[in-house]
Image: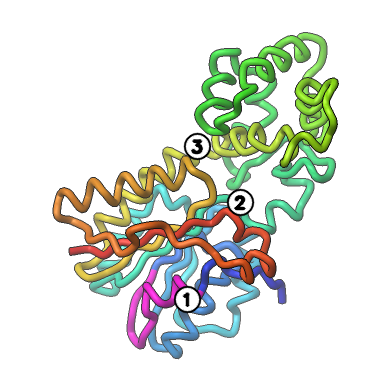
Amino acid sequence: MISHKPVLINQVLRILEPKEDKVFIDCTLGAGGHTEKLLEGMKGSGKVYGIEVDDRNLEIAKNQLGSHKNVHYARDNFKNLEALGQEILKKEGRIDGILLDLGLSSMHIDDPARGFSFQSEGPLDMRFDTRQGVTAAEIINTYSLEDLLYIFNTYGEEKHAYKIAKRIIENRRHRNFKTTSELADFIAAGITKGRDDFYFKRHPATRIFQALRIATNREIEVLEAGLRGAVNVISKGGRIVVISYHSIEDRIVKNLFRDKKKEGVLNILTKKPIEPDEEEIKENRRARSAKLRAAEKI
């Protein structure tokens, strides 16, 4: 069994209140950690529909949840949540809760071949769904200066965006970037020159890698579509829980919940985002930047 601790699980369970006969959608199944706890809370009588775009993660979840009944799997992108949710409504008659645990899973980071992390050598891939064509390598090696600037500024909020993008354009005239460590070292060399390495609290390539991952997987577009779908298919009294890991995602969730509250569609359950305590962060580093927001359908 693979152990991947679900983030903010106590808060998720408190808000979603898993009880007998409830129906949930886990839009980001991952290794199945949140789904497993929801199933346990429903004592075998409720159902969880798990959506996962990554085929390897989906297999891990199936192995992890093999002993549990009443879990249904779909290899799909949660941007299609509205269509998937409508099918579930036809079968079940209602949807009591929807969970979105966004961002990068530990399985992605741990596998160098997926190219998500610069901690080890790997190809510049970064695709959640290996069926799609565009990789991080294509973005870095073919996109224009203007496009790279937009990605680095918008998705990475990188203050050195212009300098990094310009150097990338100049370098690729001679050779393309192929690996994660090659790109990370190149970025670091252009920023840290003449400075003590300890000047930086994080690796200089961190924000660029985040931006590339978001652009490769079109994560903002997916999140916006998924949230709209969640609001449309959740039943009256049902609850939507979203766990985000950077300010861009959190801002989108906050603004959509606020707008839907003004429209009289949602009641916001979290005045401020819920964050993990020190004990959880110590036990699970992935939780350190997590923020949970929740809303209820009126």
Residue 71: mark: 1
Circle nearer the viewer, 2 or 3: 2
Q: Which mark is residue 218?
A: 3
Q: Nearer the viewer, residue 26 or 248?
A: 248
**Is residue 168 rendered to the left or right of residue 229?**
right
Q: Are marks 2 and 3 in contact (CB under 8 Å)?
A: no
Region rendered in magenta: 10-24
Give the residue drawn at x 44%, y 71%. Answer: 12
Q: Earlier in the sequence, mark 2 or mark 3?
A: 2
Residue contact between numbered discs 3 and 1, judged by CB atoms under 8 Å: no
The 10 Å Cα crowd at callout 2, few under 14, some 14 to 19, many 20 or more, is some
| Crowdedness near tag 1: few (<14), some (14–19) or many (≥20) residues, C-alpha within 10 Å | many
Q: Position of residue 176 (x, y in %)?
A: 78, 20
Residue 14 part of the magenta-drawn span: yes
Query: On the image, numbered disc 2 is attached to which residue?
Result: 104
Query: The disc labelled 3 sits on which kind of residue?
Result: Arg
Q: Specify the amino acid type for callout 1.
A: Val
Name the spot of residue 34 as percent of width and height, x first.
52, 71
| Relative vertical location of residue 212 with respect to residue 222 in this rendering, above or below | above
